[in-house]
Image (tube, grey):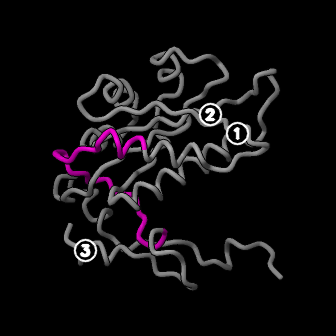
Amino acid sequence: MTTTDLDDRRAETTAPIEELLAMRWSPRAFDPTAEVTDEQLTSLLEAARWAASAQNSQPARFIAGRRGTTTFDRIERHLMGFNRAWAPNASALVLAVVSTEDAEGRTLRWAEYDTGQAMANLAVQAHALGLHVHPMGGIEVAALQAEFDLPQQLVPITATAVGTIGDPVTLPERYRERETAPRTRRPLDELVLARD
């Protein structure tokens, strides 16, 4: 994609928001030759680590692998459906894992929310570094738990592709239009249930 194409991806907002947020979107076409450095990957994980969490419980855990590594392959083989067609071109995959219990075995009620915040931090940091991410819910949860020998309380919830935008022409034809279609969101008044 060209710079002009990327400018076309800017969110049309009803109020000003930070440019990093306005330009954040989730491509599927990744450059299969681009690499994410170890320093960049560490920066993404560090941003995720510093996300807010209820009572500072820090329930988010991460399994990260760069393309060409065993960890990447172990995550990739458990992606589902169409994710298997495009995600292998990403430079890295990050598996978000939630710890559902604290050290005493008590349920962490907000653990998934907190892990979502960590991954949102990761997404914004990626964009600040000139990278893009695409989170995926289509993963084989039980298979990933077994693949990485995770205890019952550590549950994979999403996998996120990280990389540099590639050419939409690399996607299967039926998905190319979706890659370049205008971005949409529900109107704000549909989402805000009460406001004074």
Name the secondary structure under disc 2: strand
Looking at the rendered image, the quarter that the N terminus falls into is bottom left
Q: Which residue is mark 2?
A: 98
Residue 103 to residue 15: above or below = above
Classify residue 193 by image quadrant.
bottom right
* CB contact under 8 Å: marks 1 and 2: yes
Magenta stretch encompasses residue 27? yes
Residue type beneath disc 1: Ala
The majority secondary structure of the magenta stretch comes to loop
Q: For this view, does 71 lie left or right of residue 45?
A: left
Q: Which residue is mark 1?
A: 111
Q: Position of residue 134 (x, y in %)?
A: 40, 51
Q: Position of residue 102 (x, y in %)?
A: 76, 27
N-terminal label among 3 and 1: 3
> What segment carries the magenta color?
21-42
Compare residues 47 and 132 and report the one nearer the observer: 47
Residue 149 to residue 141: above or below = above
Looking at the rendered image, the quarter that the C terminus falls into is bottom right
N-terminal label among 1 and 2: 2
Residue 121 to residue 19: above or below = above
The residue at 61%/16% (across/down) is 151
In this view, the residue farthest toward the front is 39
The residue at 57%/42% (across/down) is 49
Name the secondary structure under disc 1: helix
Q: Which residue is mark 3?
A: 5
The residue at 48%/42% (across/down) is 45
Residue type beneath disc 2: Val
Q: For this view, does 124 lie left or right of residue 186?
A: left
Magenta stretch encompasses residue 120? no
